[in-house]
Amino acid sequence: MPKAKPFGGYNIKFENCPESMEDVFGKKPLSPSEMTKVLWKFIKKHRLSGYND
Protein backbone atom coordinates (compact mmCIF):
# COMPACT_ATOMS: atom_id res chain seq x y z
CA MET A 1 0.00 0.00 0.00
CA PRO A 2 1.55 3.37 -1.01
CA LYS A 3 2.11 5.97 1.68
CA ALA A 4 -0.49 8.75 1.67
CA LYS A 5 0.62 12.33 1.17
CA PRO A 6 0.32 14.65 4.19
CA PHE A 7 -3.02 16.45 4.43
CA GLY A 8 -3.02 20.11 3.50
CA GLY A 9 -0.27 20.23 0.91
CA TYR A 10 2.58 21.29 3.21
CA ASN A 11 5.79 19.65 4.30
CA ILE A 12 7.27 21.05 7.48
CA LYS A 13 10.78 19.93 8.31
CA PHE A 14 12.25 20.57 11.74
CA GLU A 15 15.53 18.84 10.88
CA ASN A 16 18.60 20.61 12.27
CA CYS A 17 16.51 23.04 14.35
CA PRO A 18 18.34 23.56 17.65
CA GLU A 19 15.37 25.30 19.33
CA SER A 20 13.52 23.47 22.08
CA MET A 21 9.75 23.60 22.60
CA GLU A 22 10.38 26.11 25.39
CA ASP A 23 12.42 28.27 23.00
CA VAL A 24 9.52 28.29 20.54
CA PHE A 25 6.54 28.62 22.91
CA GLY A 26 8.04 30.28 25.98
CA LYS A 27 7.45 29.34 29.60
CA LYS A 28 3.90 30.57 30.17
CA PRO A 29 0.84 28.43 29.44
CA LEU A 30 -0.77 28.94 26.01
CA SER A 31 -4.14 27.96 24.62
CA PRO A 32 -4.14 25.64 21.60
CA SER A 33 -5.04 28.52 19.26
CA GLU A 34 -2.16 30.65 20.63
CA MET A 35 0.21 27.69 20.20
CA THR A 36 -0.83 27.34 16.56
CA LYS A 37 -0.19 31.04 15.90
CA VAL A 38 3.23 30.92 17.56
CA LEU A 39 4.18 27.72 15.74
CA TRP A 40 3.25 29.11 12.30
CA LYS A 41 5.12 32.34 13.04
CA PHE A 42 8.21 30.23 13.88
CA ILE A 43 7.80 28.07 10.76
CA LYS A 44 7.53 31.12 8.48
CA LYS A 45 10.40 32.96 10.17
CA HIS A 46 12.74 29.98 9.76
CA ARG A 47 11.42 29.02 6.29
CA LEU A 48 10.56 25.47 7.32
CA SER A 49 7.46 24.99 5.18
CA GLY A 50 7.04 24.02 1.57
CA TYR A 51 4.38 22.66 -0.75
CA ASN A 52 4.09 18.96 -1.50
CA ASP A 53 4.65 17.78 -5.03
Image (tube, rainbow, N blue to C red):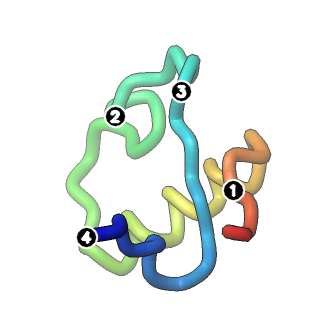
Q: Nearer the viewer, mark 1 or mark 4?
A: 4
Amino acid type assigned to the residue bearing label 2 in the image:
Met
Residue, disc 4: 1
Residue, disc 2: 21
Report how far apart the C-alphas of labels 4 and 2 lie in the structure: 34 Å
Q: Residues within 10 Å of mark 2 (few under 14, many from 20)?
A: few
The secondary element bearing badge 1 is classed as strand
Q: Confirm or deny contact between disc 3 and disc 4 (CB under 8 A).
A: no
Residue 47 x %, y %: 78, 46
Q: Confirm or deny contact between disc 3 and disc 2 (CB under 8 A).
A: no
Q: Nearer the viewer, mark 3 or mark 2?
A: 3
The secondary element bearing badge 4 is classed as loop
Amino acid type assigned to the residue bearing label 4 in the image:
Met
Q: Quadrant of residue 44?
A: bottom right
The C terminus: image quadrant: bottom right
Q: Is residue 20 left or right of residue 42?
A: left
* First in residue order: circle 3 vs circle 2: 3
**Depicted 48 relative to depicted 18: above or below:** below
Residue, disc 1: 49
Residue 14 x %, y %: 52, 35
* First in residue order: circle 4 vs circle 2: 4
Q: Nearer the viewer, mark 4 or mark 2?
A: 4
Q: Nearer the viewer, mark 2 or mark 1?
A: 1
